[in-house]
Image (cartoon, helix red, strand yellow):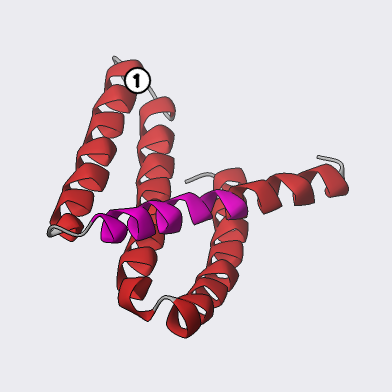
Amino acid sequence: MNNEIKFMVRKILIFDIIIAVVLAIIACLFFINYSIALLIGFGVAVATFLINSLISQYAYAGDKNNPAMITVAGFALRVILVCAIGILLYKGNTFNVVAYMLGYSSHFISLTLYGITLKKEGM
Protein backbone atom coordinates (compact mmCIF):
# COMPACT_ATOMS: atom_id res chain seq x y z
CA MET A 1 0.00 0.00 0.00
CA ASN A 2 1.25 3.46 -0.74
CA ASN A 3 1.70 5.98 2.07
CA GLU A 4 -1.39 8.02 1.23
CA ILE A 5 -3.66 4.96 1.44
CA LYS A 6 -1.95 3.79 4.65
CA PHE A 7 -2.53 7.22 6.20
CA MET A 8 -6.21 7.18 5.22
CA VAL A 9 -6.79 3.64 6.48
CA ARG A 10 -4.95 4.32 9.74
CA LYS A 11 -6.96 7.47 10.42
CA ILE A 12 -10.29 5.79 9.60
CA LEU A 13 -9.39 2.83 11.82
CA ILE A 14 -8.79 5.22 14.72
CA PHE A 15 -12.28 6.65 14.20
CA ASP A 16 -13.61 3.08 13.92
CA ILE A 17 -12.13 2.10 17.27
CA ILE A 18 -13.72 5.10 18.97
CA ILE A 19 -17.09 4.41 17.36
CA ALA A 20 -16.88 0.69 18.21
CA VAL A 21 -16.30 1.49 21.88
CA VAL A 22 -19.24 3.92 21.93
CA LEU A 23 -21.46 1.40 20.10
CA ALA A 24 -20.47 -1.38 22.50
CA ILE A 25 -21.32 0.75 25.53
CA ILE A 26 -24.67 1.88 24.13
CA ALA A 27 -25.57 -1.62 22.96
CA CYS A 28 -24.69 -3.20 26.31
CA LEU A 29 -26.69 -0.59 28.21
CA PHE A 30 -29.81 -0.48 26.06
CA PHE A 31 -29.85 -3.35 23.55
CA ILE A 32 -28.01 -6.20 25.23
CA ASN A 33 -29.86 -8.85 23.18
CA TYR A 34 -28.67 -7.30 19.92
CA SER A 35 -25.22 -6.05 20.90
CA ILE A 36 -23.41 -8.97 19.26
CA ALA A 37 -25.24 -8.50 15.94
CA LEU A 38 -24.56 -4.75 16.07
CA LEU A 39 -20.85 -5.22 16.67
CA ILE A 40 -20.59 -7.98 14.07
CA GLY A 41 -22.14 -5.61 11.53
CA PHE A 42 -19.62 -2.94 12.44
CA GLY A 43 -16.76 -5.42 12.25
CA VAL A 44 -17.89 -6.67 8.85
CA ALA A 45 -18.07 -3.09 7.57
CA VAL A 46 -14.51 -2.44 8.72
CA ALA A 47 -13.32 -5.73 7.22
CA THR A 48 -14.94 -5.01 3.85
CA PHE A 49 -13.43 -1.52 3.89
CA LEU A 50 -9.97 -3.01 4.42
CA ILE A 51 -10.57 -5.64 1.74
CA ASN A 52 -11.71 -2.93 -0.67
CA SER A 53 -8.63 -0.84 0.09
CA LEU A 54 -6.31 -3.78 -0.55
CA ILE A 55 -8.07 -4.91 -3.73
CA SER A 56 -8.20 -1.38 -5.14
CA GLN A 57 -4.56 -0.80 -4.36
CA TYR A 58 -3.61 -4.12 -5.96
CA ALA A 59 -5.79 -3.58 -9.03
CA TYR A 60 -4.55 -0.09 -9.87
CA ALA A 61 -0.92 -0.36 -8.79
CA GLY A 62 1.53 -1.66 -11.31
CA ASP A 63 0.74 -3.14 -14.68
CA LYS A 64 -2.44 -5.21 -14.39
CA ASN A 65 -4.21 -6.42 -17.54
CA ASN A 66 -7.75 -5.72 -16.36
CA PRO A 67 -8.04 -3.70 -13.13
CA ALA A 68 -11.79 -3.19 -13.65
CA MET A 69 -12.35 -6.95 -13.56
CA ILE A 70 -10.37 -7.25 -10.32
CA THR A 71 -12.46 -4.44 -8.82
CA VAL A 72 -15.75 -6.06 -9.86
CA ALA A 73 -14.65 -9.43 -8.49
CA GLY A 74 -13.71 -7.77 -5.20
CA PHE A 75 -17.09 -6.05 -5.09
CA ALA A 76 -18.90 -9.36 -5.65
CA LEU A 77 -16.80 -11.04 -2.93
CA ARG A 78 -17.62 -8.30 -0.44
CA VAL A 79 -21.36 -8.37 -1.21
CA ILE A 80 -21.45 -12.16 -0.82
CA LEU A 81 -19.59 -11.90 2.49
CA VAL A 82 -21.93 -9.23 3.88
CA CYS A 83 -25.08 -11.08 2.76
CA ALA A 84 -23.90 -14.47 4.02
CA ILE A 85 -23.20 -13.11 7.49
CA GLY A 86 -26.56 -11.32 7.51
CA ILE A 87 -28.32 -14.57 6.60
CA LEU A 88 -26.46 -16.44 9.34
CA LEU A 89 -27.50 -13.82 11.90
CA TYR A 90 -31.14 -13.91 10.85
CA LYS A 91 -32.06 -17.15 12.67
CA GLY A 92 -35.75 -16.21 12.49
CA ASN A 93 -35.26 -12.90 14.26
CA THR A 94 -35.49 -9.86 12.01
CA PHE A 95 -34.21 -7.59 14.76
CA ASN A 96 -30.82 -9.31 14.53
CA VAL A 97 -30.67 -8.22 10.89
CA VAL A 98 -31.71 -4.68 11.80
CA ALA A 99 -28.98 -4.50 14.46
CA TYR A 100 -26.48 -5.93 11.94
CA MET A 101 -27.43 -3.28 9.37
CA LEU A 102 -27.18 -0.51 11.97
CA GLY A 103 -23.73 -1.72 12.97
CA TYR A 104 -22.68 -1.96 9.33
CA SER A 105 -24.02 1.53 8.61
CA SER A 106 -22.21 2.96 11.63
CA HIS A 107 -18.92 2.56 9.80
CA PHE A 108 -20.00 5.42 7.53
CA ILE A 109 -19.65 7.74 10.53
CA SER A 110 -15.90 7.05 10.45
CA LEU A 111 -15.74 7.79 6.74
CA THR A 112 -17.64 11.04 7.27
CA LEU A 113 -15.37 12.09 10.15
CA TYR A 114 -12.34 11.37 7.99
CA GLY A 115 -13.77 13.57 5.24
CA ILE A 116 -14.42 16.36 7.72
CA THR A 117 -10.83 16.19 9.01
CA LEU A 118 -9.54 16.36 5.44
CA LYS A 119 -11.62 19.44 4.78
CA LYS A 120 -10.36 21.10 7.98
CA GLU A 121 -6.75 20.26 7.10
CA GLY A 122 -7.23 21.80 3.66
CA MET A 123 -6.37 18.69 1.66
Seen at 87% across and 42% down, the residue is 122
Q: Position of residue 104 (x, y in %)?
A: 41, 53
Residue 51 locus on image (x, y percent): 35, 46
Looking at the image, how many numbered discs can be counted on the residues? 1
Quadrant of residue 102 in the image?
Answer: bottom left
Could one spot residue 44 in this view of the protein?
Answer: no
In percent of the image, x 71 and y 44: which residue is there? 115
Q: What SS does tag 1 mark?
A: helix
Q: Is residue 17 left or right of residue 54?
A: right
Q: Is residue 93 magenta?
A: no
Relative to 83, say whether 103 is above or below. Answer: below
Look at the picture and state if 59 lies above or below 101: above
Q: Which residues are magenta?
A: 94-109
Q: Amino acid at mark 1?
A: Pro
Rendering coords of residue 9 (x, y %)? 54, 53
Q: Residue shown at 42%/75% (left/top)?
A: 31
For residue 96, what is the image quadrant? bottom left
Left or right, residue 45 beside residue 120? left
- Answer few, some or many: residues within 10 Å of disc 1's Cα (few below 14, many 20 plus, some between 14 and 19): some
Residue 2 place in picture, x, y as percent: 53, 44
Q: Quadrant of the C terminus?
A: top right
Is 102 magenta? The answer is: yes
Q: Is residue 103 above or below residue 29?
A: above
Above/below status of 72 relative to 65: below
Q: Main SS type for the magenta part?
A: helix
**Image quadrant in which you'd find residue 39:** bottom left
- Residue that mark 1 sits on: 67
User: Can residue 25 be seen here?
Assistant: yes
Q: Which residue lies at the image location 23% right of the left edge and 51% below the top edge?
A: 86
